[in-house]
Amino acid sequence: MQKITMAEDKLLEAIQLKSRAGAAALYDMYANSLFGIINRIVKNTEMAEDVLQESFIKVWDSFDQYDASKGRFFTWISCIARNKAKDAVRSRQYNEFMHTVPLEDHAEKIERDNQVNFNTDTVGVKQWTSGLKKTQRDILDLIYFKGYTHAEAAAQLNIPVGTVKGRCRKGLVILKKIYSELNIADITLKCG
């Protein structure tokens, strides 16, 4: 089956009209990227698929809340997916599932986590973050790439939540400056 793609403005219009083609294009264009974001946080394929479905439903149902002046569409839907994944990890169902996972499934997960994957969403990010202090890089890594909350990052690094938020904010200001110097259009980063 051929994937449906549309120009972003046409996609947004189709979603606004709640058209079937808009739903299909939304899924075909963004499912793989969102699944990657979700799976890095949830670390379980079956649960990640469920969270992906919930994320698309949330995007579809709350599309009227999207404001193009505040950021790109992909940034908005990836935030929804990231938040849904974080909610899933905090859920009782997830904790019960993780306590009952057979040992062989843990072995497969460890092997998967140790494989090197090419991720087009983060191409160049390593280079851009090299200009940050290690403390800022560590916090951004925990929050944006590993799905930690500010409180979880603070606990992991054994520092106050306010310090995490401050370092995160300073790191994002530096990255925003780098992005603007590279003329990367409409990058919206938020911390908090």
Image (cartoon, rainbow, N blue to C red):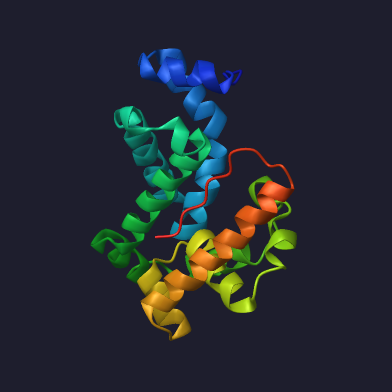
Is 156 rendered above or below residue 177?
below
The picture places residue 21, in percent across and down from the top left corner, at 46, 14
Query: Which residue is nearer to you in this view: 108 or 133?
Result: 133
The quadrant of the picture occupied by the C terminus is bottom left
Is 41 rendered above or below residue 60?
below
The picture places residue 135, in percent across and down from the top left corner, at 58, 78
The picture places residue 179, in percent across and down from the top left corner, at 67, 50
Is 51 rendered above or below residue 98?
above
Q: Is residue 98 left or right of residue 107?
A: left
Q: Is residue 60 left or right of residue 82?
A: left
Residue closest to the far bottom? 158
Q: Residue at x 57, y 18 (%)?
A: 6
Q: Residue at x 35, y 29 (%)?
A: 63
Query: Which residue is nearer to you in this view: 83 or 40?
Result: 83
Callout count: 0
In the picture, residue 141 is in which quadrant? bottom right
Q: Residue at x 32, y 56 (%)?
A: 87
Q: Residue at x 32, y 61 (%)?
A: 94
Residue closest to the far left? 92
Tell me if residue 29 can be seen: yes
Tell me if residue 119 can be seen: no
Q: Is residue 164 left or right of residue 183?
A: left
Is 96 rendered above or below residue 2?
below
In the picture, residue 1 is in which quadrant? top right
The picture places residue 74, in percent across and down from the top left corner, at 52, 37
